[in-house]
Image: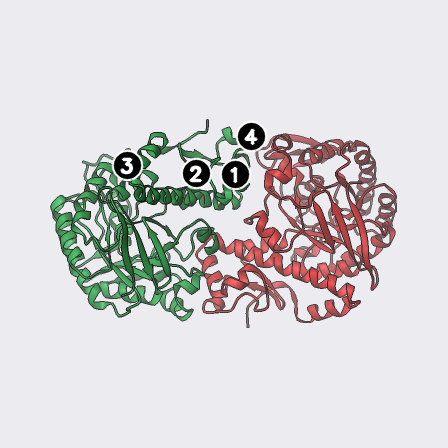
Chain colours: A red, B green
Amino acid sequence: MATRFEVLVAGPGPARVGRLSTPHGEVETPALVIVATQATVKGLTPEEVRAIGIQVVLANTYHLYLRPGPDLVARLGGLHRFMGWDGPLMTDSGGFQVFSLGSALEHGVGKVARIFPGLDLDVPRRAVKPRLVTIDDDGVTFISHLDGSRHRFTPEKSIETQEKLGADIILAFDECTSPLHDYEYTRQALERTHRWALRCLAARTRSDQALFGIVQGGAYRDLREASARFIGSLPFEGYAIGGSLGRSKDDMHRIIEWVVPLLPEDRPRHLLGIGEPEDLLAGIARGIDLFDCVAPTRLGRHGAAYTARGRLNLRSAALKDDPAPIEADCDCYTCRRFSRAYLRHLFNAGEMLGPRLATIHNIRFLQRLIEGARAAIRAGALNEYAADFLASYRTGATELPG
Amino acid sequence: MATRFEVLVAGPGPARVGRLSTPHGEVETPALVIVATQATVKGLTPEEVRAIGIQVVLANTYHLYLRPGPDLVARLGGLHRFMGWDGPLMTDSGGFQVFSLGSALEHGVGKVARIFPGLDLDVPRRAVKPRLVTIDDDGVTFISHLDGSRHRFTPEKSIETQEKLGADIILAFDECTSPLHDYEYTRQALERTHRWALRCLAARTRSDQALFGIVQGGAYRDLREASARFIGSLPFEGYAIGGSLGRSKDDMHRIIEWVVPLLPEDRPRHLLGIGEPEDLLAGIARGIDLFDCVAPTRLGRHGAAYTARGRLNLRSAALKDDPAPIEADCDCYTCRRFSRAYLRHLFNAGEMLGPRLATIHNIRFLQRLIEGARAAIRAGALNEYAADFLASYRTGATELPG
């Protein structure tokens, strides 16, 4: 088998500490998977990612399929070698782009609808951009966002592409629905996703890659449970929870609670595309083993830094004289070496080093949070750990220092 | 004295190997000074700059005066601490901006006029942008390129600003003329520069900073020689050659040959703003000890990499399958870890890591060239070393691989 997964410590509740072994090394879980969309964690070298403590990286099949292309990556020895990352590596299936380039643009929403605060969810959406994607029962036809060229993904094509890229863990090709899709559409999409899951399993040819199935079903309990039972019954090496996670964090928590108990206990569970600090803790407490999210890198590029009290706006004039690091007790390279005043200067002056240093801090912040959660599970004190963190952490809006 | 300079090996000809000792460490000369305009070598950490072998960095007083301001830098412990560079550090005087924001924009030329190939040098220039600078005998009034605010630099203000920044080596405030200024204007500007040099010496208050004087005089032999004699007679800890270096590389070489023999042998000589590979070798052979240039970082950001055969365009489609590093025998991080194909992908995909990796290579390329020149001087074989290099290196235009 391509990967082995062991649960080392279980409880309290569904939370657990585990070890995922891949051909390129081990991942302690719960783990943060850092996103390397175009075969690079934006701005960082592989050595920097490793030094932060990150053990596994996820690249996007859609992007790499379009540029530089899976055949080129294969000729150059596969994605590990191409990008210089010799640790555990994942690719997604490209299916999420069905959502992010099709329905998400059309509906103007993300994975959790409420993240767009002004949006009235009861008003039917009109397309805000031309639909770039058409879905049929066999696959998906889409228009490249790069050059307008026409492409088609099917389950077989996704697996073939991911086999050429050669990651350690690959994902089944699914249809990811929007929070605004109704029950009937979500049900039809789910049935497609289930048929596609079987085709993915049939299409795989590499024994050195783990294939994770994806549970869909939107925010509908019966659909999520049916999907967890069906996908969970198939011989995947791991299971991901994808698609719409409802209209609120509460919805997201409920969806995880419906799904996790129905998945095999001896396989890793990945919550796709979620990774704000409070979401990591909520997911871990509910039995999630793996998370991936662009938030730490994206926020860092835009000058927002995680702190134990909430986000810090690194462009704020309030920092201009501040000799302190982003966080006094942080062990990241940025906090060991540079002041808030210097970071503010870098962002203010448009210097590349600013996004890089903020990204390093943000990833390390989440990595430390996860490392702490693992220790807390081992100590039987996860709830206390989460409560402590959330008592000072203010979610969402960027905070000023003080 | 703030710095000590020893000539360790002299010859053949004016070339020499030396050691410049500063309060923040030693610099072996000839040396490449890497530019950190806004208190950061664009995209790199101080540790990366150090790992490349760079021993001394130059920040721009004009930029730091405007943003974040010298008082703020001083409050935060000075520029070394602010930017996290604990090695030898220089600042320029701000005087170059008299040129680069005033005459250079007006004339549409750089330090060596011929670098703008289409320019007819005999046609009188009209202003191409509104003049942002006015010069009088006391100093310079200029408009900030950031916000249009009005500022004034005098020799005293430049020294005060550089003392607040706190570099190990600071530069006298001078007027930098354009290759298109006529003899009479160049002579008047030179006289101002000489009076300002005396005022800079009188204004300095810190004994832990070395102050370098600047020789001006454009491409006019009598002016350059008069300036070298006058500035060389003043008690500066080092001497820089600034201003217009003529209309061709030959002009530049002649100017160095006029000036260097008239400067004190026991002090370092810095050729300001020059640093293409062939220029380094030409300068070293003519007795230059220090060079600074934005070329390696600027070219790197724009996807051009130095190689022993000339520049390589990292965006070129010809590299898309190329598994080789930029240079097989280069010991830089980039060449040890990544292929041309990957670098081409990074530039093609607009990823930040591309400029960073190309910058590392370019700086290391020039640093190796200089380290080789030092070894060649010690071996009495500088001419052969330079001839070997220039036999394969094609200057100027970016080359394709092959």
**Identity of the residue furthest to the front in this view:** B379
Residue B166 is at least partly visible in this image: yes
Whichever of labels 3 and 2 marks the residue nearer the N terminus, that label is 2
Locate residue B63, reporting x and y percent.
36, 57
The answer to whether the residue labelled 1 contacts the one labelled 2, judged by CB atoms less than 8 Å apart, is: yes
Query: Which disc is residue B383 wearing?
Result: 3
Q: Nearer the viewer, residue B65 or A166?
A: A166
The answer to whether the residue labelled 3 contacts the one labelled 2, judged by CB atoms less than 8 Å apart, is: no
Q: Callout 2: residue from which chain?
A: B
State the residue position of label 1.
Answer: B343
CA gap, disc 3 and disc 1: 34 Å
- How crowded pointer 3 is (Cα within 10 Å; few <14, some 14-19, many 20+) is rated as some
CA gap, disc 2 and disc 4: 17 Å
CA gap, disc 4 and disc 1: 11 Å
State the residue position of label 4.
Answer: B321
B305 displayed left or right of B260? right
Q: Nearer the viewer, mark 3 or mark 1?
A: 3
The kind of residue on which mark 4 rests is Asp
Query: Which disc is residue B305 wearing?
Result: 2
The kind of residue on which mark 3 rests is Asn
CA gap, disc 3 and disc 2: 25 Å
The kind of residue on which mark 2 rests is Ala
Q: Secondary structure at mark 3?
A: helix
Whichever of labels 4 and 1 marks the residue nearer the N terminus, that label is 4
